[in-house]
């Protein structure tokens, strides 16, 4: 079974799906609404399974060179800096490749995938293509864009994020729901951050309704900083709203000086904020249209697995399309292979957030750090059974 596939969205999930499908001989076009693809985002966690999936697609060596193994994560008391769980570790962890999760700058991972897709087909990615609607007639799907162009395909994959146009039009008209959490992030040069890295290379400071996480990127030259705080006052639209040091500091003013010191040194030009939104679980396919990544199953970020889930989707969907005798069987196999995995991560992510944002950090314990949760981080999209 081979044919034409249109992918809406050139994010990590869309590009992974494109690369996997190109490797299997499909004719693929990816349609991205941004005029250009640039350096967007900050640090993300690449699960060991997602890493193995991307290595199977031929980009393993580039990923290993651009990423760092996730160290032991220390959970620290927000005010005192005292250890609550894990361990403070200033040394570099052993590099065991994709046997363990890795940290990577999203822009580096995106560039690696984009370059691999372009190498497979220089015309595969089309930018400045904002989708306005999708249609199908049972045998074909069609995408209509703001520039009045239209494309048809044997399958349309919607990898267009939490606010997916395709999902809202054809699957679930209800808009995403604000989760009562806002997030801040920035990147700080290591030489600037060093005076505030006394507790080790990867620390999550936990307080009442707030966490502050930092870890190293790009060979240790950058410190990735993210804060997530309960807050019901989000009124912005989008996930890339400029933030100020003052408002970031206001959320964390009572945290340890290592935290507030880092916040005060956040480069204003790359400090952003966004609201966290969720959507209920739904079926992922209708006829010749299927959802992938956040369009299908947006989750909260407390385990750092959102990007990994999208890339896993791309690998499994390509395997299902390669193995199944027809499109309907392939899409059924894709969802069946992914549902339990995605639901487990969704539930555990909520539980993780509730635990580390507990009301009284002086009187609770933590049972594990995310990097040690093998059951969630070791899922392998290359070998999960497909029932076709």
Image (spheres, rainbow, N blue to C red):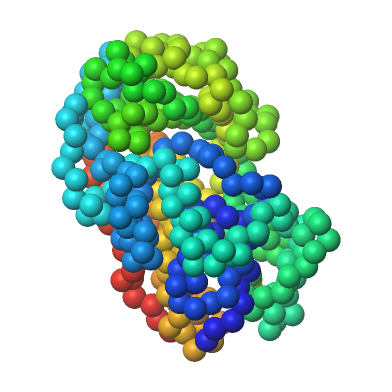
Q: What is the quadrant of residue 256 in the picture? A: top left
Front-most of residues 86 and 52: 52
For the question of whether residue 130 can be seen, the reply is yes
Return the residue found at the far bottom.
Answer: 325
Image quadrant in which the C terminus is located: bottom left
Q: Residue at x 41, y 61 (%)?
A: 312
Front-most of residues 353 and 59: 59
- Compared across the picture, whether 383 is left or right of 265 comes to left
State the count of labels: 0
- Compared across the picture, whether 225 is left or right of 182 comes to left
Report x, y in % for residue 126.
65, 59
Report x, y in % for residue 77.
29, 20
For the question of whether residue 339 can be seen, the reply is no
Q: Residue at x 30, y 55 (%)?
A: 61
Report x, y in % for residue 238.
65, 38
Report x, y in % for residue 371.
27, 43
Q: Residue at x 56, y 22 (%)?
A: 269
- Compared across the picture, whether 158 is left or right of 134 comes to left
Above or below: residue 349 compared with residue 143: above
Q: Residue at x 77, y 59 (%)?
A: 145
């Amino acid at each position: 079974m081979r044919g034409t596939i249109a992918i809406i969205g050139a994010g990590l999930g869309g590009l992974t799906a494109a690369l996997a499908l190109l490797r299997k001989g499909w004719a693929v076009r990816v349609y991205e609404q941004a005029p250009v693809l640039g350096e967007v985002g900050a640090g993300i966690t690449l699960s060991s399974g997602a890493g193995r999936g991307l290595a199977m697609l031929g980009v393993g060596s580039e990923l290993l060179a651009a990423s760092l193994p996730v160290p032991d994560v220390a959970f620290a008391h927000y005010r005192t800096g005292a250890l609550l769980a894990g361990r403070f570790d200033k040394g570099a962890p052993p590099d065991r490749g994709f046997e363990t999760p890795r940290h990577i700058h999203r822009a580096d991972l995106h560039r690696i995938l984009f370059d691999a897709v372009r190498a497979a087909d220089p015309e595969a990615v089309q930018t400045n293509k904002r989708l306005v609607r999708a249609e199908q007639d049972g045998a074909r799907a069609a995408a209509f864009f703001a520039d009045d162009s239209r494309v048809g395909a044997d399958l349309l994959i919607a990898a267009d994020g939490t606010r997916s146009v395709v999902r809202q039009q054809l699957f679930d008209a209800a808009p995403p729901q604000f989760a009562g959490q806002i997030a801040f992030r920035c990147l700080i040069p290591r030489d600037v951050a060093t005076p505030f890295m006394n507790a080790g290379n990867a620390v999550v400071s936990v307080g009442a309704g707030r966490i502050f996480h930092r870890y190293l990127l790009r060979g240790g030259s950058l410190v990735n900083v993210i804060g997530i705080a309960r807050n019901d006052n989000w009124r912005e639209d989008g996930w890339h709203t400029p933030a100020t040091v003052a408002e970031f500091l206001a959320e964390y003013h009572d945290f340890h000086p290592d935290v507030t010191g880092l916040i005060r040194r956040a480069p204003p030009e790359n400090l952003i904020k966004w609201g966290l939104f969720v959507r209920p679980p739904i079926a992922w396919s209708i006829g010749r249209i299927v959802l992938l990544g956040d369009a299908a199953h947006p989750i909260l970020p407390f385990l750092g697995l959102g990007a990994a889930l999208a890339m896993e989707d791309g690998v499994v969907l390509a395997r299902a399309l390669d193995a199944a005798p027809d499109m309907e069987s392939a899409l059924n196999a894709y969802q069946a292979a992914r549902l339990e995995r995605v639901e487990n991560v969704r539930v555990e992510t909520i539980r993780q957030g509730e635990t580390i944002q507990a009301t009284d950090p002086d009187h609770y314990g933590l049972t594990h750090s995310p990097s040690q949760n093998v059951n969630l981080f070791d899922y392998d999209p290359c070998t999960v059974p497909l029932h076709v």
